[in-house]
Amino acid sequence: MEIIGLFPTWYEPGVGSGWVVGIMSTIHVLFSHTSVGASVFFMILATIAYRQNKPELLEFVKRYGLFLLVFSYILGSITGPGIWFSTTVASPRGISALIHTFVWKWATEWVFFMIEVVGVYAVVYLVGKIDQRTHLRITVILGLASYATMLIILGILSFMMWPGKPEWFTEGGYLNGFYGANTFAQLSMRTMFMLSVTAVVGSIVTAGFTDLEFRRKMNRWLATFGIVGVIVGGALFQWYLATLPNYAHLIMENRLPEWFAPSLYATLGGMLVYFIAMLVTPRLITTVVASVATVSILIFGLWPEEVARESIRKPFVAGQYVYSNQIIARDVPGLGIKSELPLIEDKGILKTHIFIPENLRTITDNNKVEVGQTLAMILCSNCHSLTATGIRPMVNYFGGNTNVVEIKGYLLGALATGNTLYMPQIPLKDDEAEALAAYLTTLGGTH
């Protein structure tokens, strides 16, 4: 028997493995963007404080830094490993693709991250305890190291969308995979929005100052950065869109929910209004108001953006060669990788997946529905929930249809041939398609 190296499927029946990863990742983006933006902000404020003799700016750096230690570094250190754990079980081959392609980039990112963690402690606790030049150097090192982590991560995220250069498929090489037009467009856009997120989160800190004049002054600094971030970031978003492949635009036009664009524009408009309020009426920006604004950005801004980014690279999860269901879908000569679709088409998934229970490798009338459920878990559950809740419930697509012949015809005519816009090619054998169709007809009762 020829076996392909698939892993066991992590099936989360509540919200689905995709949403577990997505929710954790979105929360982490809030923490990570704030930490990078604040580090760059500290670098600018410390330079001005020492060169223009404005020690009050260092007091704000200290207060914001203490808040950052809990908000970004402690909470971020929980969600960061959480992303690794969840993605490793949800998408083991996707993570493998990133590690094998960018192992030294990951190592470099961790070096910069360690500098960042040590640096933020040093910046906060050494204010007024060492000479100004040394403290400024530490602050600059913190800002640059923090920004370097963002550059590396975004290069890898861009590869997950589309390898930087087409030569990567034939020649390999992390430079070909990492550096593409999308890398720098995404870095520029996120840099601006990072400043805006930093400004909103920073307003939680300024709300704690009792000196109204000082609060007004720091709000002015933060709001200026925030307004620049929103306006310039909005313009750079158009550049980012222009670097996406045509395939991604096609998916955005046909698959993104209708609320996506209005949600983003409303969030950007709301942020501008919030920053204007910071400038005009600093008394209005209380701890509660600032906290609500931060959560609003998370829900109405970061979540739609992360959902969209994940959606437009489908059906692939990494490098345009690993499907979301972990099947290798194309040859990558540069890495010595062969597509598994021909083998699956020839032998079937039941005969080639190593973790199929032996009693389900042969389909009978008695186990047909169970085999269909197993196939749905393996091939579909990374993107679709098998229950009525969670991510893209399959019941919404097939619920109520009890015609096995019709569903089987769709599976063989669309999925098996790859004749779909969004979903991967799944070259099912005739009996596998019938088993999956039989299972899908049982979903009507959960709608």
Image: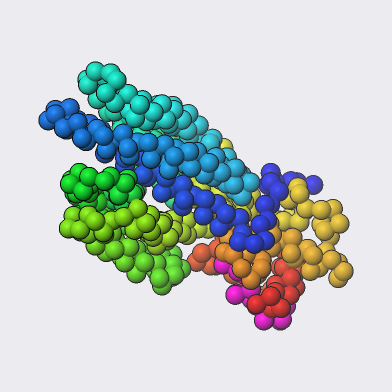
Q: Locate the C terminus by quadrant.
A: bottom right
Residue 345 appears in the rendering: no
Name the spot of residue 382 as percent of width and height, x first.
61, 57
Question: In the picture shown, does residue 332 fall above or below 264?
Answer: above
Q: Residue at x 19, y 31 (%)?
A: 55
Q: Residue at x 35, y 26 (%)?
A: 125
- Asked whether 50 falls inside the magenta stretch, the response is no
350 displayed left or right of 32: right
231 displayed left or right of 34: left
Question: Splitting the image into 4 quarters, where does residue 109 fall?
Answer: top left
Question: In the picture shown, does residue 301 fall above or below 96?
Answer: below
Name the spot of residue 292 as percent of width and height, x first.
38, 58
Residue 121 appears in the rendering: yes
Q: Residue at x 63, y 46 (%)?
A: 89
Q: Residue at x 41, y 36 (%)?
A: 69
- Magenta stretch: dominant secondary structure: loop
Looking at the rendering, the stretch of residues picked out in magenta corresponds to 392-404
Question: In the picture shown, does residue 133 fall above or below 312?
Answer: above
Question: Splitting the image into 4 quarters, where does residue 85 fall?
Answer: top right
Residue at the farthest left position: 52
Name the spot of residue 44 as percent of width and height, x first.
22, 35
- Asked whether 395 falls inside the magenta stretch, the response is yes
330 displayed left or right of 39: right
328 displayed left or right of 225: right
Name the spot of residue 3 as percent of width and height, x first.
74, 46
